[in-house]
Image (spheres, grey):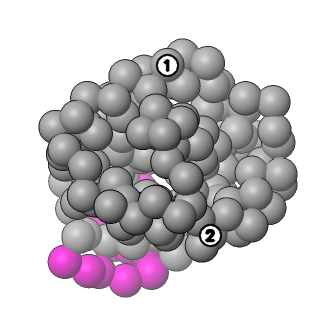
Amino acid sequence: MKKDLCEIERMAHLKEEENQSFMIFLKGCDHFKVDKIVHKLNEKYLSLYDCTKCGNCCKQLAPSLSQEEILEITDFLNITYEDFIEKFVNRETTNGFILKNQECPFLNKNKCSIYEYRPEACRSFPHLHKDNINHRLLSLLDNIHICPIIYYIFEDLKEIFKYTPEKTT
Ligand code: SF4
Ligand code: SF4
């Protein structure tokens, strides 16, 4: 876990093709086995990696929020729902409301200023404790250059499954 975020980004771009082909390989593996291994690796890296010193997802990904989550935050911030929508929301999608800026407006000196009320999308990211990893490989790959935990788990998986780039089944 020594590489800094720029190096992770650089390496992830370099390995883009390899990771694409590893994703295809992984899709052919036992889904339950993949989930079990990833959950274990996730626990390992969450204990090794201090997200408060990274915050890269808060800087590069706009989370989605539900109406209920917005109401909790507006209560906490003591602003109206309408003000929140006008000031912070970019658009509404089927997954909820998306914040305006890529760098979250609630990030303050690398800390979440609404931590107790942060949306589920933030609590759960990078979603590696959940089942059905094999069905979410594409979205994980989308964020592999942002999140060191995803990056290292992919690297570990290659070793565990003895993957070599030529191996596609
Ligand atoms: S709400 Fe908090 S945890 Fe979520 S992206 Fe913003 S700063 Fe990060
Ligand atoms: S989840 Fe990933 S990107 Fe977000 S703070 Fe933790 S290590 Fe960084």
Instruction: For residue 6, say whether it is visible.
Output: yes
Sooner in the amino-acid sequence: mark 1 or mark 2: 2
Which quadrant, please, contains the C terminus? bottom left
Residue 142 location, x and y as percent? 50, 67
Which one is in front in this view, the residue at disc 1 or the one at disc 2? 2
Residue stretch in magenta: 78-94
Q: Amino acid at mark 2?
A: Glu
Q: Relative to 63, is 130 on the left or the right? A: left
In the rendered image, the vertical position of residue 101 relative to residue 161, given as above or below: below
Q: In terms of image quadrants, where is residue 32?
A: top left
Residue identified by numbered label 2: 16
List x then y, in percent, for residue 111.
65, 36
Q: Is residue 78 left or right of residue 154?
A: left
Please tell me which residue is depicted at 54% across the width and 25% down the height of the picture: 45
* Local SS, label 1: helix
Could you classify mark 2 by the number of other residues whose Cα lies within 10 Å: few (under 14), some (14-19), or many (20 or more)?
A: some
- The residue depicted at 28 percent of the width and 39 percent of the height is 34
Residue at x 44% of width, y 26% of height: 41
Q: For the point 25% across and 69% down, which residue is it?
A: 96
Tell me the residue that label 1 is attached to.
44
Q: Quadrant of residue 91?
A: bottom left
The residue closer to the viewer here, 21 or 6, is 21
Comparing 139 with 64, the one in front is 139
